[in-house]
Amino acid sequence: MIKRIFLLCLIIQTASVFSQTVQWASSLKRFSTEPGKKAFAAKQVLGKPSVLPAWGENPTAWASSNMDSPNEEFIHIAFDTPMQIKQVVIGESYNPGSIKEVIVFSETGKKYSVYKNDTIKPRWSTGGRMFHVMMPLTEYKVSEVKVILDTKKIGGSNQIDCIGISDGDIPVEAIINEIQYAEEVGEPENLGPQINSRYDDMLPIISPDGKTLYFGRKLHPENIGDEKRDDIWYSTLDVNNNWTTAQHYGAPLNNEHHNFVSWISADDKTILLANDYKNPGVGQRISISTKNNNEWGFPKRLPVDDMYSENEYSCYHANTEGTAILMAIEREITFGDMDIYVSMKRKNGSWTEPKNIGNVINTAAKEGSVFIAADNKTIYFSSEGFSGYGGFDMYLSRRLDDTWLNWSEPVNLGKKINSKADDFYYTIPASGDYAYFSSRE
């Protein structure tokens, strides 16, 4: 639990390195190999860092198709505006050390070798780094850079996150784009044994009044079915404002399949749940349940056109009016793995086919655990595809129009919330005083 998050005061913080200009690769010229057209593709090297300063295998970086190629691997990129430079910076996000040569090209096409290493020693490498080639200010304007790798010398997949140039003396580093008030967020508090157990407790969703917390618990002996899959558990606040010991919800919300609550209406009378309760074997679906006499009714399948997902995991959340649903699923039209899609409610009660909300939010890595705030414009989601602290981090973005397809650049919620492990499933009551999330830290 997090106290006093300044939800109404979040301002995007832009990154700057004093007065020096930094450009990141904007287009591809040539490359040796790539394992595919999405994950680890050569185009993933374009733009600012999307992995670093964290490091590790990540599909938003470029990797050659052969981890230990007997031939030289290379990538050749260009920049929007030719400029005189004092440094080339290369983001090696996994198994660094294989850079053999760096060549820059002037705007007239003349090439200059600015770094060369013919004595790379065979070894296994770990971690990641921003590799800097520093030099006096060039007399010519640099428009392109070619990076040559000797991947057979460094074990594993040698991955390149980004390539940049700068006219400054200060080495360019990867900067996490955080909310401005990240340091003013309260320290996270474990909800304690009333909520957390020795089993897997995740997928929290708080009621609008902040008095009931639903969550998913896996492998507990009280769960229904032999495999003890995710079941819905809940806790309520007592008269002293403390959480009571969590209880298993039972039927009809729980059965032998994966069960979790994904959204609660503002009047606390309708919930969305994962899967089809009547035909649980048909794949990823969304169900809806309404409350009568303070009891939830049997969930009915929500009629969404062409609803399917190619991923075993999913997450759903609706806006306050219940007219738009954001879905973290994987479909044929994807930027890589799980992406976030939108479905809109029609006047007849049916829902449109899920539509990908675009590459401002979605990356070649996984996006998930999406939550729409009460203002119907701000979303919180988790991703492995942006610069962060490691694993899944949580980010904020704002909807820019009514299409649900245009979004502001995501900002990281900061290191008090995000850790080196996976952090996800952010949920906020209508008051905005507290937030709840899951963490593997």
Image (spheres, rainbow, N blue to C red):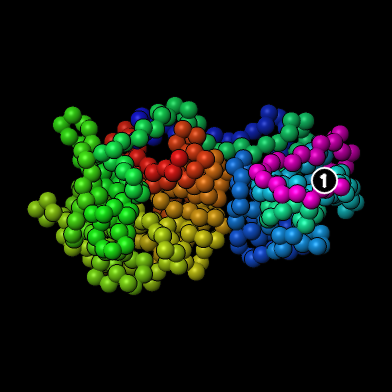
**Quadrant housing residue 290:** bottom left
Picture coordinates of residue 259, whole percent (x, y)? 29, 58
Query: Magenta includes 124?
Result: yes
User: Going by the picture, which residue comes out furthest to the top?
Assistant: 184
Question: Viewed as shown, does residue 143 lie left or right of 400?
Answer: right
Picture coordinates of residue 41, whole percent (x, y)? 65, 60
Q: Is residue 306 visible?
A: yes
- Residue at x 66%, y 49% (from the top left corner): 94
In the depicted view, which residue is nearer to us: 173 or 359?
Answer: 173
SS type, badge 1: strand
Depicted 363 relative to depicted 97: above or below:
below
User: Going by the picture, which residue comes out furthest to the left?
Assistant: 293
The secondary structure making up most of the magenta span is loop
In the depicted view, which residue is nearer to us: 334 or 68?
Answer: 68
Q: Which residues are magenta?
A: 119-146
- Residue at x 39%, y 59% (from the top left corner): 314
Q: Is residue 374 visible?
A: no
Picture coordinates of residue 435, whole percent (x, y)? 35, 38
Question: Viewed as shown, does residue 256 lie left or right of 404?
Answer: left
Circle 1: is it few (<14), some (14-19), or many (20+) Cα within 10 Å?
many
Query: Magenta includes 228?
Result: no
- Residue at x 60%, y 62% (from the top left corner): 38
Q: Quadrant of the N terminus?
A: top left
Question: Viewed as shown, does residue 287 lie left or right of 361?
Answer: left
- Residue at x 45%, y 36% (from the top left corner): 417
Say what amino acid the circle numbered 1 marks. Answer: Val
Picture coordinates of residue 201, whole percent (x, y)? 34, 47
Question: Mark 1 — residue?
Answer: 142
Q: Quadrant of the C terminus?
A: top left
Question: Viewed as shown, does residue 246 lie left or right of 108?
Answer: left
